[in-house]
Image (cartoon, grey):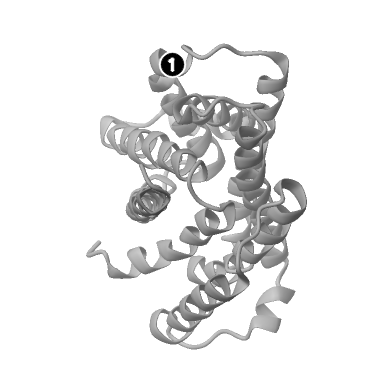
Amino acid sequence: MSGISTRAAGHGEMLVWSLLIGTSFPIAEYLVRDAHPLPLTGVRFLIAALLLVPVATRVAINPRRLIIWAILGALLAVFFWAQFHALRTVGSIELSLLYLLSPPGTAILAWYANREYLHPVPLAAFALVLYLVIQYLILPAPTDLVALLARPGSQVYLLGCAAVIGYAVLSRGAILRNWLPAAAATTTFWSLLFAGVLLCLVGVTRLPEVAQWHWDHWWRLVYLAVFTSILSYWLMQRALQKLHPAIVVAYGAVVPLWVALLPF
């Protein structure tokens, strides 16, 4: 596959990734009515990891790989913890404005950690267009960014954005250095497993809420596990082998557009 075809495939994978994540919002909103989001996400990740066992365990493991996978899982857990904490006081669309800081942050860290260069003009133009769309087409009224940054929930969410940056740069850097195998399913399995365990431990007192669910809750959770956990993170891992990590992270800013456009 040529370089252009490879990059095009990576963009296609991330576009599908953003669509899948967009479809998760109405389902997650339904589920959190009856369960705390932390153990809910932890159980979702553990179900996804369980389903991946037959594929993921074919790759040999060693201490260095386990440590990197554990760090990736911890970064995932930090992001979801920060996101759920921030959503108590800040709207999801407003948080997407803060997320726009993640792609340039990823580009800077990727340069220092992996020596990967990305021309800043396309990335800046992409962020500017999304900023204008979110501010003036999606939000009912433009948001004061200074006031938004001053909210405690926003500051916690910036910690989650830093975790996303670290996840993308470490995941790609570990593959470039041959510390991890280029096996998207394996990295997806281990990162979801560690993240699921951590989130369940943090929300352990609320786990009984999940145990009391009925089948109409569980089939929605299985959908989230299969399509917005296994498939979405597998697509992300594949794209990280083809694209600069800042580009991969930038697709996260497309998710609010799907949420606004999809007829839910």
Q: Residue furthest left?
A: 263
* Up/down of 211 relative to 223, above or below: above
Front-lying residue, 64 or 114: 114
Residue type pointed to by label 1: Val
Q: Which residue is drawn at 58% across and 76% down?
A: 121
User: Could you tell me if residue 166 is visible in this image?
Assistant: yes
Q: How many marks?
A: 1
Residue 98 in percent (x, y) is at: 61, 69
Front-lying residue, 126 or 132: 126
Question: Mark 1 = which residue?
Answer: 53
Front-lying residue, 26 or 138: 138
**Which quadrant of the figure contains the C terminus?**
bottom left
Left or right, 121 with respect to 218, comes to right
* Up/down of 121 relative to 211, above or below: below
Q: Which residue is drawn at 46% across and 44% down?
A: 236
Q: Residue furthest front?
A: 2
Q: Which residue is drawn at 48% across and 13% down?
A: 57
Residue 212 in percent (x, y) is at: 40, 29
Q: Quadrant of residue 167?
A: top right
* Up/down of 137 relative to 149, above or below: below
User: Could you tell me if residue 203 is visible in this image?
Assistant: no
Q: Residue at x 34, y 64 (%)?
A: 258
Left or right, 257 with respect to 49, comes to left
Residue 201 in percent (x, y) is at: 65, 29
Residue 14 in percent (x, y) is at: 40, 52
Give the class, few, some or many, for how many residues have Cα within 10 Å of label 1's Cα (few <14, many ≥20): some
User: SS class of the residue under badge 1?
Assistant: helix
* Up/down of 44 relative to 130, above or below: above
Front-lying residue, 51 or 123: 123
Left or right, 57 with respect to 106, comes to left
**Which quadrant of the figure contains the N terminus?**
top left
Q: In which quarter of the image is residue 73?
A: top right
